[in-house]
Image (cartoon, rainbow, N blue to C red):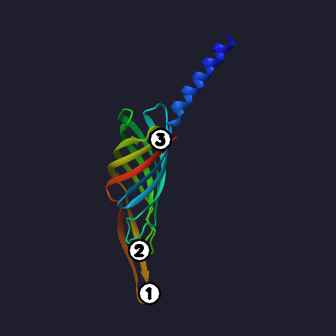
Amino acid sequence: MKRLIIYVAVIILFSCNVSAQQSNRIILQVAANQIELGYQHKLFNQKMWGQTYVGLGNQDVNSSFNDLLAGIKIGFDAWSNSKNTIWVNSNIGIYIPNNDYYTAVTPVIGVGIGYSRYIGKSGKHALLLNAGYQYGERDYRQKFSSRMADIETVGNFSVAPLYFSLGYGFNF
């Protein structure tokens, strides 16, 4: 009887470990105007997940990847099989342009759809395609002053509304 209990316990532990191996993912995504590094974890069930991300962007007046971005995503696997997954997600984040002309810390919200193709025998590696819509807009003020006059202008910073990214994911 003790052996039966031990065998059952070992089988349950191994089966829990197998599903837990695929509940975490490290993601690197590259788009035309931003690069993101994220950590994704399955939430309440195997179809729902949450992700935090940080990255660098290039959407302001200078032409270098020095803007900061960060946020969270909540997603749902709409369809999946052993090698493919199609998901939908929503995100909320912040975009911080880094330049000498203005400061415009911008909140960003968005929705997206994505596709994962698992590669390798163990399915730990994934190629990702992601597309969606995001909205982020912020007014800013610039002041120029001299001994003769003070000039103040108002401008508007907004993130690119449509995005498309390619990525790599490592599941563990």
Provide residue 20's location: percent of width, then percent of height: 53, 33
Marks 1/3 in contact by CB < 8 Å: the verdict is no
Q: Is residue 131 above or below residue 100?
A: above
As drawn, the residue found furthest toward the left would be: 162
Residue 1 quadrant = top right
Image height of 127 relative to 45, above or below: below
**Mark whose residue sits in front, 2 or 3:** 3
Closer to viewer: mark 1 or mark 3? 3
The amino acid marked with disc number 2 is Gln
Which quarter of the figure has residue 99? Answer: bottom left
- Residue annotated with mark 2: 142
Task: Give the residue type that dot 3 points to.
Answer: Lys
Q: Which mark is residue 146?
A: 1
Label 1 crowd bin: few (<14), some (14–19), many (20+), radius 10 Å: few
Find residue 85 and report its horizontal and vertical position in percent. 36, 38
Residue 47 shown left or right of residue 133 in the figure: right
User: Along the polypeptide, which appears first: circle 2 or circle 3?
Assistant: 3
Residue that label 3 marks:
124
* Foreground of the two, 102 or 150: 102
Structural distance between the alpha carbons of marks 1 and 3:
60 Å
Report the side of 5 relative to 53 (left or right): right
Secondary structure found at label 1? loop
Q: CA distance from mark 2 to mark 1?
A: 14 Å
